[in-house]
Image (tube, rainbow, N blue to C red):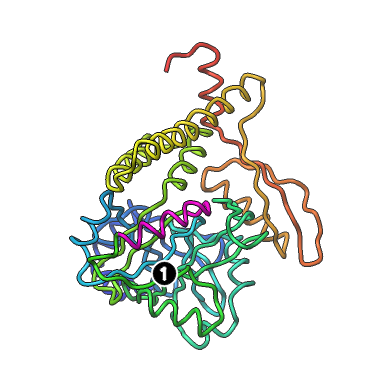
Amino acid sequence: MNLQRVAEKLGITVDRLESLQETKVSKSFWPEPQLLRFDKEISGIEAGTVIFESGEIVWGYPRIRRPLMLEAAIKGHFIDSVAVEEKMNGHNVRITSIDGNIVALTRGGFICPYSTEVAARLLPEEIFERLPGLVLCAEMVGPENPYVSSEVYPTDSIDLYLFDVAQRNRRGTYGVYKTQEIAERFGLRATAFFGEFPLKTAHQRIREIILKLGRQGREGVVLKDPKNRVEPLKYTSSESNCSDLEIAFRYYNDYAQDFFLSRAVREGFQSVEWKEPEEERRERARRIGESILLPLIETIEKKQRGETITQRIQIRVESLATARGFEYHLRRCGIRAIFDQPLPEDDGYRIGITKIIMSTNDKTEALLDGEMW
């Protein structure tokens, strides 16, 4: 690796890059190709940024901020109009081709064997040949998503939806219209595009979209500048907030406190901005309360019966090597998982996986035994 050239691409000195390798940048030797991974944002370089042995860089996808008062944020942040697309509930990957091989990077910069196999299966072979250096930013969704399982999308397995495109060694992305163009050109699915709206009426149209998405059990929207001049924002439905709370309270000791607080606060601001009548506000309160209390009680009673707190997921793979690789990937991410015996199918194998939710298991057992909170 030519450190001088890599440092220039990153916009830092060679000395700074070398010092980061000793403290803030992790080496990954598996799976191939080898890479350096930025664990945290530092020196203006996004977390999840990856440097391959060849010196090729895939920049981390920037965090998207979230407004609480929609109308005020739109008018204060965007310039003249807002492009609105769906925010899907799955896991975020950046897909590129290195030395002729497709790799799918997680948000944190790991190569995920399972996501890589899915990407290789769903993407047309010629896309990276015709567009060298392309980075596809995509959401993987469906019931066989091992990170965020959801059955609201039209698949019984897992699908890939493009939401942005970028270029290796180049910071930033190309924006909503270029993304839609590439998706159409290569026959790829893309996140739903609801249109471009003027600032004056955008918040009203977005509220209508959010209410419809919420009724469908979907997550929300991403708001983008049509010309990619300012960073995007995201905004979620009440149903999505409550679904997050339901999962978080089911595994209450495995989530940071901010995860709980932020979603409850979003609900308060949304209710106020939308000037909900008393009946709607009480319905929102009931929905939030049930999403908090019922899964928590279920977890406590399950542990009281001596059962282990687990999460069941399922994947389908073409190769057992992918399954073994994914098992190792979960282990290096600190996730304890038990893989069932693979069940052969026409196009590969179906494998059930039991995730052991360790922190919530241990904490619940201790509290039931009289430990203080």
Number of marks in the rendered image: 1
Residue at the far bottom in the pictured view: 130
The dominant secondary structure in magenta is: helix
Depth order, front residue of 227/69: 69
Snapshot quadrant of residue 283: top left
Label 1 element class = strand
Q: Quadrant of the C terminus?
A: top left
* Residue sitting at x 50%, y 32%: 290
Looking at the picture, which amino acid does disc 1 mark?
Phe
* In the image: residue 142, left or right of residue 318: left
Q: Which residue is mark 1?
A: 194
* Residue 189 x %, y %: 54, 73
* Residue 333 x %, y %: 51, 47
Residue 210: in magenta span: yes
* Residue 215 x %, y %: 50, 52
* In the image: residue 311, left or right of residue 293: right
* Residue 19 x %, y %: 28, 57
* In the image: residue 73, left or right of residue 61: left
Residue at the far top in the pictured view: 370
* Residue sitting at x 46%, y 57%: 212
* In the image: residue 291, left or right of residue 268: right
Q: Quadrant of the N terminus?
A: bottom left
Snapshot quadrant of residue 176: bottom left
Q: Which residues are magenta?
A: 204-218
Residue 278: in magenta span: no
User: Compared with residue 209, is residue 215 higher up or lower down, i.e. above or below?
Assistant: above
